Amino acid sequence: MGEKKKKIVKTIKVDLDKCNGCRACEVACSAFHAAPKYSSNNPARSRIRVIHEPLRDVYVPVYAGEYAKAECMGRDKYVIDGKEYDECSFCRASCPSRDLFKEPDSALPLKCDMCEDDPPQEKPLCVQWCLNDALTYEEREEEVEEEVKQEDVERGLDSMIDKYGLDKVMDTVTRMALSKKG
Ligand code: SF4
Ligand code: SF4
């Protein structure tokens, strides 16, 4: 068991009734994460995507979640207001079965980071630019186990190993460790 730590849990509440599909959230997110910041915008680089089926008239903003190394064994299918959506439409994972939530040039996974910044933003950019108030930001404090951080490191390494291969990643880590010692 690890040590208990206080952690701020950040939540974005999505109200589908208020979303009109303007996609300002996608533009704001991709511009905020561009390098340099605000130098470009491209919804394909956004960590929030608005899923819309033209004939089925509902807009669902979906946030980029965890990286998945392999496709999952099952499939999710949603019916909303009697309208059936494509399989996996609302899944948050960056996974091998589709292009969603992957950096278009490098194919590295994208994940919502709640616009962590220094100095911190008052609210995430997608919330700031959602003029219809479909997105609402909330924070609360919780006690969590330290180990959570270790899982994050492993997930990040997994994704790098998939992209560059174990040998390259090992070489780089060894070289970095030696340079820090020396
Ligand atoms: S919280 Fe920030 S990183 Fe996450 S989707 Fe919104 S703008 Fe993008
Ligand atoms: S900015 Fe708000 S209203 Fe526009 S698509 Fe995004 S969530 Fe929906």
Image (cartoon, rainbow, N blue to C red):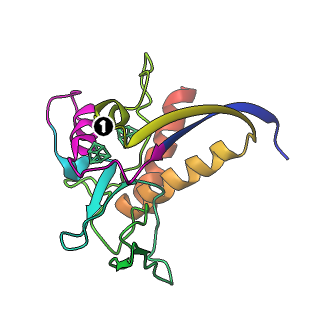
32 in relation to 82, above or below: above
Pick whichever, 57 or 163, lies toward us: 57
Farthest-out residue, left: 40
**Mark 1 secondary-structure assignment:** loop
Return the x and y of residue 151 as percentages of the image width and height. Answer: 62, 51
Return the x and y of residue 153 as percentages of the image width and height. Answer: 56, 47
Q: Is residue 23 magenta?
A: yes
Query: Which image quarter: residue 89?
Result: bottom left
Give the left or right position of residue 122, taking residue 144 as reference. left
Query: Which image quarter: residue 144?
Result: top right
Amino acid type, callout 1: Cys
Pick whichever, 57 or 164, lies toward us: 57
Chain part drawn in magenta: 13-40
Residue with the mark numbered 1? 130
Tag count: 1
Which residue is located at x 42 percent, y 27 percent?
123
Give the left or right position of residue 23, taking residue 146 as reference. left
Mark 1 residue CB less than 8 A from any atom of ligand 2 = yes
Which residue is located at x 49 percent, y 59 percent?
158
Disc 1 packing (10 Å; few <14; some 14–19; many ≥20): many
* Quarter of the rendered image showing ligand 1: top left
91 in relation to 112, above or below: below
Type of secondary structure dominating the magenta stretch: loop
Return the x and y of residue 147 as percentages of the image width and height. Answer: 72, 45
Pick whichever, 115 or 134, lies toward us: 134
Return the x and y of residue 91 as percentages of the image width and height. Answer: 43, 66
Which residue is located at x 18 percent, y 69 percent?
54
Q: Is residue 96 magenta?
A: no
Give the left or right position of residue 158, taking residue 111 as reference. right
Farthest-out residue, right: 1
175 in relation to 95, above or below: above
